[in-house]
Image (cartoon, rainbow, N blue to C red):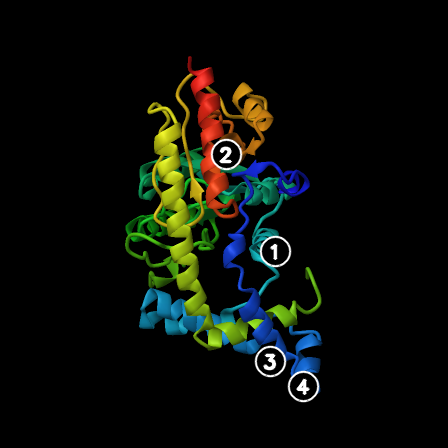
Amino acid sequence: MSTALSQPRLISLAAGFTDQVTLPVEETRAIMEELLGSAKSGSVTLQYGTTLGDPILRELTASRLQLLDGNTALSSIATAERMIITNGSQQLLYMVTEALCDPGDIVLVEDPSYFVYLGILQSHGVRTKGVRMQPDGLDLAHLEELLTTLQREKQLHRLKLLYLVSYYQNPTGLTTSFEKKIGALKLLRRFERAAGHTLYLLEDAAYRELRFRGEDVKSALAIKGNHDFGSSNLLQQLLARALGSDLYERHLAVLRNRYAQKAKVTRKALQQHFPPSVRWREPEGGLYFWPRLPHPLTSGTRSRFFHEALRKEVLYVPGELCYADDRDRRKPNNEMRLSFGAASEGNLRAGIERLGQVLQKLLR
């Protein structure tokens, strides 16, 4: 991200920034004017909020989850009393890890997975093991194999949770099916007695509402079965107003249409400029494509491809950064994450054309 910001001419297909055009400047200004329109409402808005988060926002968030999953059983699970509002997803991931894990514990992650969370786990001294991915999410047979191995090696008691980025995954764009979530929960429950404690499923659904193709998938919630003193009250008041009106839904439609168009532009550019030997899947939502280069090309930070791309002023995320440190397998080094979130349509075309030129050169 810092590289993208410090080099204005660089076409960054790496940083997962959102689309500049869709940022709701006017809508935010209108809400801010409403919030700060009187001394009474303004002082409440600018004062410290509760540590758990604004009560109205928590209620609206609970209602939103119930609406998304369309399941009345959630009324007793997704409630305001069970909600906390954090300053971004990273803080919540950090807090959950700090609460559940000790140094030397084990967390299962998708292989590959969200590299920011891999860094959080590493900073806590937590070991990671990767679960292979299939087109519809986790490879359940591999998950069962890993759990069985941990039990046999008497390490199951160190396992604390399974982490999934379940919708249009960062980095691959894959979505975990509802059936795979059910299967994963059943396996975790089956091994809980041997572990001696609860085995948690941590579902990161950050991109769920950025679906622009296909059908929605229910979250795992639908399956029946002291970092700061006071959170950011101003932002919570703003979001509560947006959720409590039709503004949130209207803007969500804008985002879906915009990202659908940018995904289409990216797909066409990949088809036009990348050699046929490069493999990738078209996402149904989110912000990412996940191309796989043919042997013997590599995409890591030390690879010729990465440095040739930088010389052409294009940046991507090397796939090796998205894999956990797992001694039971070698990290793949021929993949890359391309984000169509922030780059303009023109830069998407130009950046992918430049990457394609490098690939054609290296494959001669």
Q: Is residue 123 left or right of residue 246?
A: right
Residue count near mark 3 (Cα–Cα under 10 Å), binned few <14, some 14–19, many ≥20: some
Label 1 to label 4: alpha-carbon separation: 32 Å
Which three-letter amino acid code belongs to the residue tagged 3? Glu
Residue at label 4?
38
User: Residue placed at 56% from the left, 27% from the top?
Assistant: 312
| Circle 3 SS class | helix
Label 2 to label 1: alpha-carbon separation: 21 Å
Along the line of sight, which residue is nearer the eye, 314 or 93?
Answer: 314
Precedes in sequence: disc 1 or disc 4? 4
State the image quarter where residue 335 is shown: top left
User: Residue placed at 33% from the left, 41% from the top?
Assistant: 140
Residue 34 is tagged as 3
Residue at label 1?
91
Of tags 4 and 2, the one toward the viewer is: 4
Residues under numbered marks 1 and 4 in contact, where contact means CB atoms less than 8 Å apart? no
Which three-letter amino acid code belongs to the residue tagged 2? Tyr
Precedes in sequence: disc 4 or disc 2? 4
Q: Can residue 339 be seen in this view?
A: no
Label 4 to label 2: alpha-carbon separation: 51 Å
